[in-house]
Image (cartoon, helix red, strand yellow):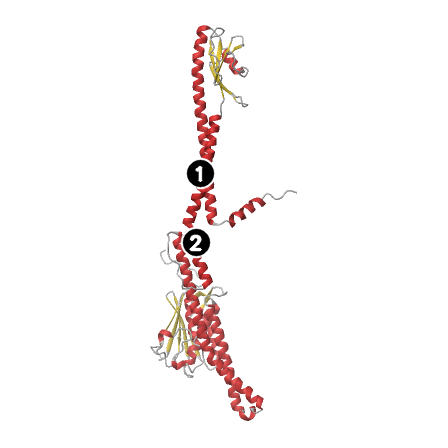
């Protein structure tokens, strides 16, 4: 059974793909030169052959006219035939009866062809024919003379073409070798920036030094590639710095609740081992301690969830949908009431459609309501207003608390930032940072101001979208 014919091309393709770019350029340059030399040889050979043939035919016609003139004047049977020189020209006279005369010692020419016989009979004036079916081919010219004809012939000599072809072959080989050397030199010079760029990238990979800057050199595609890699290094550098900052801040924020939780648990374990738990901790104190432990665990859970959400950044599997932001606000307010039953939320929302991720938007709204609930007095509700302003969906969360100091306003949306007045309240300092990230991811913005009630007014703006199935009616006169 024969093997598939497509295996060899695939093997050749794999071999070619394994070659370096420098080798590919060298092979391409040598191949291009070889093809060019071959095409030039073919064209030059044809031109030389035509030129030699035309020259030989002109010489045969001239010799035939001289011999025909002599034959007409002296007669075909008596005309003096030139002696055979040993090589080159051959002559022959065709008599009226079809017989022939040739000089003494001259090699025999091929038999008179039918077309040449017709010339001798007067049916045609002349004839140029080639008999090159073997190595002893002849170029024969037949010319009418008297009652017969004369013929002058030359051996078809390919030696000039052969010598020319051999010379072109040597020149072609030299050109191919020179082209390969030139191609490799050009490839080495042209790919030198790529080599230096590769070495720099390998060095960065080995040293993990993202502060390294690859020198900008060259132009065109090489320069754009270097700039792109430098931009990528800058992005990785910023990402690593952000991760480091997040880890340091997270470690700092986790230290306090973990320390408090560990001390309370160690106290319970120590008293339990001594058997003095009931005597050392009355029921009221034990209940208060357990409540503190539950609050600390809840705070750690909230902090872990917010850290996970913040660390993921914009990477999420949640798809973007066209949704009514009013539904998201109502769902977030319901969750806020269930988490903190004492919080009172007053809703004033209108239907505004946006394009976004439902879970992320609900988390942002919930963080805004939770933040306002921590500051708003028990007898003052958190006011949540949603409206459309032109092409913008505007969400405002208003509390009646003490407001935000002017010194704290620039850092309200920073990660882990908590004002001095807020350090005694529960929270991780990540809620408003998540709000800012969600706003940025949706092409919106989050801002803070002072409300008319004296508290904080947090505003969350998003680009509005056209409701689904909306039909624009033509105006009058259109």
Q: Give the secondary structure at mark 1.
A: helix
Residue 216 sits in quarter: bottom left
Q: Is residue 175 above or below residue 217?
A: above
Q: Measuring from the top left, give residue 288's x and y in whole percent.
A: 51, 88
Marks 2 and 1 sit apart, C-alpha to C-alpha, by 28 Å
Q: Where is residue 67 in the image (x, y as percent from the top left)?
A: 45, 11
Specify the quadrant of the image occupied by residue 392: bottom left
- Using the rendered view, name the quadrant where residue 73 is placed: top left
Does residue 235 appear in this view? yes
Q: In this view, does 121 lie to the left or right of 226?
A: right
Q: Is residue 133 left or right of residue 430?
A: right
Q: How crowded is mark 1: few (under 14 residues within 10 Å), some or many (20 or more)?
A: some
The image shows residue 325, relative to residue 278, as above or below, that is above
Helix, strand or loop at mark 2: helix
Q: Relative to the observer, which residue lies in front, 161 or 434?
A: 161
Screen quadrant of the C terminus: bottom left
The residue furthest bottom is 279
Q: Residue 322 versus residue 314: which sits nearer the camera?
A: 314
Q: 267 or 212: nearer the eye?
A: 212
Tell me, yes or no, whether the two marked residues, 2 and 1, touch with CB atoms within 8 Å.
no
Q: Name the residue at 47% across, 49% down.
A: 21
The quadrant of the rendering that contains the N terminus is: top right
Label 2 environment density (alpha carbons within 10 Å; few <14, some 14–19, many ≥20): few
Q: Position of residue 472 (x, y in %)?
A: 41, 59
Q: Which residue is drawn at 41% across and 81% down?
A: 423
Numbered label tally: 2
Q: Mark 2 points at which residue?
A: 195
Q: Name the residue under label 1.
A: 175
Q: Give the x, y percent position of residue 326.
A: 44, 70
């Amino acid at each position: 059974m024969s093997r598939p014919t497509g295996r060899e091309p695939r093997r050749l393709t794999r071999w070619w793909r394994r070659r370096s770019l420098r080798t590919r350029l060298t092979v391409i340059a040598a191949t291009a030169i070889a093809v060019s030399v071959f095409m030039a040889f073919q064209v030059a050979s044809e031109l030389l052959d035509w030129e030699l043939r035309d020259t030989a035919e002109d010489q045969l016609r001239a010799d035939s006219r001289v011999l025909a003139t002599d034959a007409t004047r002296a007669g075909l049977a008596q005309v003096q035939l030139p002696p055979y020189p040993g090589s080159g020209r051959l002559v022959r006279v065709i008599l009226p009866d079809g017989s022939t005369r040739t000089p003494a010692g001259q090699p025999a020419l091929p038999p008179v062809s039918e077309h040449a016989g017709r010339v001798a009979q007067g049916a045609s004036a002349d004839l140029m024919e080639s008999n090159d079916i073997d190595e002893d081919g002849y170029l024969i010219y037949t010319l009418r003379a008297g009652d017969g004809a004369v013929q002058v012939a030359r051996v078809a000599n390919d030696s000039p073409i052969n010598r020319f072809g051999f010379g072109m072959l040597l020149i072609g080989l030299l050109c191919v070798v020179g082209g390969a050397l030139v191609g490799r030199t050009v490839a080495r010079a042209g790919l030198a920036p790529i080599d230096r760029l590769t070495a720099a990238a390998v060095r960065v990979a080995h040293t993990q030094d993202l502060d390294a800057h690859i020198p900008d050199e060259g132009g065109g595609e090489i320069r754009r590639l270097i700039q792109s890699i430098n931009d990528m290094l800058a992005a990785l550098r910023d990402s690593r710095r952000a991760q480091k900052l997040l880890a340091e801040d997270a470690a700092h924020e986790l230290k306090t609740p973990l320390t408090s939780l560990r001390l309370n648990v160690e106290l319970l374990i120590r008293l339990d081992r001594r058997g003095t738990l009931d005597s050392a901790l009355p029921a009221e104190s034990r209940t208060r301690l357990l409540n503190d432990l539950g609050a600390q665990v809840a705070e750690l859970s909230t902090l872990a969830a917010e850290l996970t959400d913040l660390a993921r950044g914009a990477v999420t599997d949640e798809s973007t949908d066209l949704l009514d932001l009013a539904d998201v606000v109502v769902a977030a307010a319901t969750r806020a009431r269930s988490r903190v039953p004492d919080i009172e939320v007053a809703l004033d929302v209108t239907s505004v459609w946006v394009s976004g991720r439902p879970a992320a938007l609900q988390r942002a709204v919930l963080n805004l309501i939770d933040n306002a609930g921590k500051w708003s007095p028990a007898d003052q509700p958190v006011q949540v207003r949603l409206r459309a302003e032109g092409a913008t969906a505007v969400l405002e969360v208003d509390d009646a608390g003490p407001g935000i100091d002017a010194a704290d306003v620039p850092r309200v949306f920073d990660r882990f930032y908590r004002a001095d007045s807020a350090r005694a309240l529960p929270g991780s300092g990540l809620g408003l940072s998540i709000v800012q990230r969600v706003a940025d991811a949706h092409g919106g913005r989050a801002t803070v101001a002072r409300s008319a009630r004296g508290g904080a007014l947090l505003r969350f703006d998003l680009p509005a979208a056209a409701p689904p199935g909306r039909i624009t009616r033509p105006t009058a006169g259109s």
